Image: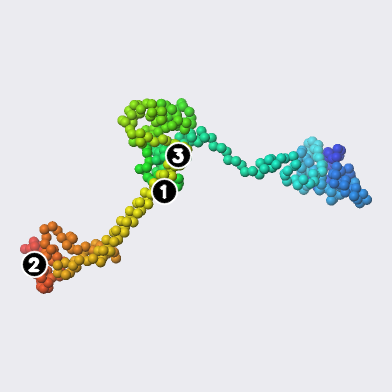
Amino acid sequence: MTQVIIRFNGRNIAVDLHPFDTPATLLERLASQNCLSHSADPQIHHDERLHPNTTPRYPNSNHLHRLRVVHQGRTLPPTSPLPFPTNSIHSLDIVPRLLGGGGDGGSTGAESRSTYLEMYAGKKHAKVNPEEERLARWTNCNLSGLPLQPPCVCDPLGFLYNKEALVSALLAKTLPHSLSYITGLKSLTDVKLEMAPIGGSSKVRFTCPVTGLEANGKVKFVVIRTSGHVFSDKAVRELKSIVEEMVGGPWSPDDDMVLNPSGEEVQGKRNALLAQVAAEKAAKKSKKDKKRAKTKRNIDDDDHGDIADDDGRTNIISTNNNNNKKKLKSEHMMPAGATSEVWNSLFKKDNDGKGTGKKNHNDDFLNRGTGVRYMG
């Protein structure tokens, strides 16, 4: 047992503290010793004035819950053990609880309506820096988001990709719908990008091989699709002879394509490409349907259009064992120089060619030579 100082209502009270004392037991002991007779709780004084004969001058068990024990600025839970002092004298404060007001952190009356609305307003998305967005188009793959590393390609709109990432997406058929205008490798252009010098800006990865301008999104760059070389627009316009020497000769202005364009023009071109791809797919499908219908019609015509030969018999050679068999006349396979009579005799039961059913003496002509060869 040790002694602590209790500060209450402007007074210091020395109290013996037991090792297992709690704030609740401490308050009950102080109340029983009439140490809390002059309470600062206005609600207790209000009850005393209403019932002067029955309510004591100190809080009873019904009033103790309105007091709290504070240690070093922290309110102690009523049932938790009190901090037991070891080497120095501790002090505890007993203060009344603040009744009313909700205690839920709501409006205190000093806050304006704008503060209340801002508290419940949703968080605004951070604005993207336009310069950082332009630079990202020249440093990251438009599909995977990874840093651009040669070999690189560009699509018909002029956006840059890592070739490996784009080819993998094409093979796996995982391209997003916004890139569905990329139908294959034929719609891509291999680009030759000039790496920026090591001592340059850490964010810029490519430069113009003629003017040295950085590809940071602020300068217009074009690719010559016939060769894949990438130059700044200034080099193409003002230093055309040097560009021709690097490309290998003159080129048509129609071969120039702007890289990483921006604005409403991009969306218009994308919609036009998507419409073109859809039209090509529809035309291809229609062509296949027509070809399939024509093939089926030819098979049906052959099934019902057997042609008889000279002696009234129908000579048919079946090329399939399916229900839809393609039938051909034997005359269609007759070699050049052969007569119809001789050729048709190969497919008749009576080999004399006259329909008498008599066996021809030349029936064993092919076997005759074989037998002679192995005789003797």
Residue type at mark 3 is Glu
Residue visible at 85% across and 46% down in the picture: 43
Disc 2, SS: loop
Residue visible at 8% across and 62% down in the picture: 369
Q: How many numbered discs, if any?
A: 3
Quarter of the N terminus within the rendering:
top right
Residue visible at 33% across and 34% down in the picture: 252
Left or right of 62: which side holds 278?
Answer: left
Disc 1, SS: loop
Circle on res. 265: 3
Identity of the residue furthest to the left in this view: 376
Residue visible at 73% across and 43% down in the picture: 107
**Residue 77 visible in rendering:** no
Residue type at mark 1 is Lys
Q: Which of marks 3 and 2 is in front?
A: 3
Q: Nearer the viewer, mark 1 or mark 3?
A: 3
Looking at marks 1 and 3 on the same chain, the residue that comes earlier in the sequence is marked by 1
Contact check, label 3 and label 2, Cβ < 8 Å: no
Residue 98: x, y in percent?
79, 44
